[in-house]
Amino acid sequence: MDLPVMPPVQPMLAKPAKAIPPGMQYEAKWDGFRAVVFRDGDEIELGSRSTKPLTRYFPEVVEALRGRIPRRCVLDGEIVIAREGRLDFDALLERIHPADSRVRHLAEVTPASFVAFDLLALDDRSLMAEPQTARRDALTAALRDADAPVFTAPATADLALAEDWFERFEGAGLDGVVAKPPHLPYRPGERVLVKVKHERTADCVVAGLRQHKSGPVVGSLLLGLYDDAGRLQHVGVCASFPMRRRAQLMEEMAPLLMDSVAGHPWQEWTSEEAQGASRLPGGPSRWTGKKDLSWLPLRPERVLEVAYDHMQGDRFRHTAQFRRWRPDREPEQCTYAQLEEPVRYDLADFLSTGQAGG
């Protein structure tokens, strides 16, 4: 492979904001695997956000790109899987599997798509020093003949339309809106874009904790909600505390610590069958590798309010953010019924908005 922009390349990143800023180019924030595509003739490589190779996990994407993108180019975009018109991140996670036969089976039953939103190189020319608007024009021209499952991400300079996207297409699994300064060159690994994500709050039961890697302070709190059958289901974690606060939380949680998992709602986490059947905290993960996922059980007696962006199935898609303790709430009141469900939209409605070129 011999391209003007060679792997590895860290993609350009975004910093969070509360509102969509004016005067930008706006795109959807896709809930998938970020991927930088390198193509030199018959050679195609897919690099992840952390520059790790993704090529072997998405053979159908490689084949689709081969017939739909220029023979020499570098693209930034997102690998996504849609089911019933909505993005499905769990289906992507299933692809990170050591068995090639499993990967190829999933490629057939849940094929992935690629959504391109930036062009870093074309033929023998690097475009990374070009402004965002010029790269966007070059991208739409380079992919003007591409069809499914390779898409050009819809984009607009209309703030009102971006706000409409933010509200209307969440039901298709889109994660929010990304705003890109029009004159910005491509700056790998830097948080120079702006992302605005949905935020909601929920009251959750604290039912366990993991210690921080630095020592016996709280690394994360394990959160639960009660389902219709009265079972406490794990829904995610709350983390990102200052170190001083981690120590305070350990002191606050100490009276709730249990000697063992016996009698705890999640005591089945210790069984080999449960670990193999469900995506449970404390279980092995192909993403975390050898990271310590052991946890300490807490009596499920305290309630806290957390902020979250959206659900993936029955769990928080991302790490929830601590907002406040809720001593006025009983644990049994923390149910799925409190969660707001966005109006569903078919992902195809967004990809066919007619904004792909503007």
Image (tube, rainbow, N blue to C red):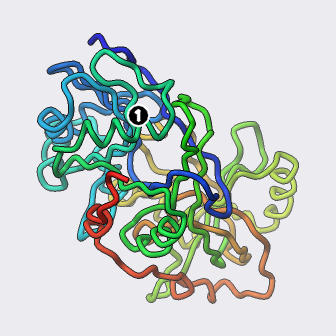
* Residue 49 percent location from the top left of the image: 46, 35
Image quarter where the N terminus lies is: top left
Up/down of 42 relative to 285, above or below: above
Badge 1 local density, few (<14 within 10 Å), some, or many (20+)? many
Up/down of 233 relative to 128, above or below: below
Up/down of 324 relative to 115, above or below: below
Residue pointed to by mark 1:
48
Front-lying residue, 20 or 227: 20
Residue at 28% across, 72% down:
346
* Residue 263 percent location from the top left of the image: 58, 73
Where, by quadrant of the figure, is residue 354 drawn? bottom left
Front-lying residue, 269 or 99: 99
Quick check: 125 left or right of 109?
right
Where, by quadrant of the figure, is residue 173 drawn? bottom left
* Residue 271 percent location from the top left of the image: 42, 58
Q: Is residue 314 visible to the viewer in this orientation of the structure?
A: yes
Residue at 34% across, 54% down:
276
Where, by quadrant of the figure, is residue 250 drawn? bottom right
Label 1 secondary element: strand
Up/down of 321 relative to 167, above or below: above
* Residue 319 percent location from the top left of the image: 59, 57
